Amino acid sequence: MKISIKILCVSVLMSVSLSTFAQKVSYKQTEKSRVEYEERFERGEVPGKKIEAKIEYNKRGKETREEKYRDGKLEEYTVVTFLGNKKSEEHTYGPDDKLISRAEFEYNANGDRIKKTTYNPAGKVIKINTYVYEYYPNE
């Protein structure tokens, strides 16, 4: 009798946690508003700190530029363009300001990103990312 009660409790707990997880997935997350306009990621001990990345934000809290560093030297930077509230393009440049790649973004009617197409400097497609969403009714 004790064994069957323990199994029942475990199965009830598992079904509760699974349904809770499904509810979390069903809700569309809203964007957080950010107050910082610049982030710096540093690596190393106090003497000789090295910046790994620097991120700049616009007044709406959207990332507009990201710089990546290796051993304290600029490796590449990305400039982001927005159309309304959605990211429309990214341009990535090397430390010499030459274009490395360009990416375009597409969204569905719900405003979710469905495609990111990346091009080389000559305009040839080098990568396509597609995104699929499952929508659950809010209960």
Image (spheres, rainbow, N blue to C red):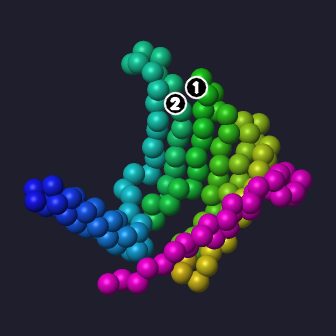
Circle number at residue 51: 2
Residue 31, position in %: x, y? 42, 66
Residue position marked by numbered label 1 in the rendering: 72
Residue situated furthest front in the rendering:
1
Looking at marks 1 and 2 on the same chain, the residue that comes earlier in the sequence is marked by 2
Amino acid at dot 1: Gly
Residue 13: in sight, yes or no? no
**Within the image, what quadrant is residue 9 found in?**
bottom left
Quarter in which the N terminus is drawn? bottom left
Q: CA distance from mark 1 to mark 2?
A: 6 Å
The stretch drawn in magenta includes residue 5: no
Residue 133 in magenta?
yes
- Identify the element where label 1 is drawn: loop
Q: Amino acid at mark 2?
A: Ile
x, y percent for residue 69:
60, 32
Q: Is residue 111 above or below residue 67?
A: below
The residue at 69%/60% (across/down) is 129
Instruction: Say which residue appears at 59% left-offset and 23% top-offset.
Output: 71
**In the figure, is residue 116 to the left or right of 60?**
right
Above or below: residue 104 compared with residue 138: above
Q: Which residues are magenta?
A: 112-139
Q: Is residue 31 left or right of residue 5?
A: right
At which x and y percent is residue 137?
41, 84
Q: From the viewer's perspective, tell me whether residue 73 is left or right of residue 135.
A: right
Q: Are marks 1 and 2 in contact (CB under 8 Å)?
A: yes
Q: Quadrant of the C terminus?
A: bottom left
Direction left: furthest residue: 2
Residue 75: name its quadrant.
Answer: top right
List the single residue furthest toward the top. 47
Q: Is residue 86 visible?
A: yes
**Residue located 21% across and 59% down the image:** 7
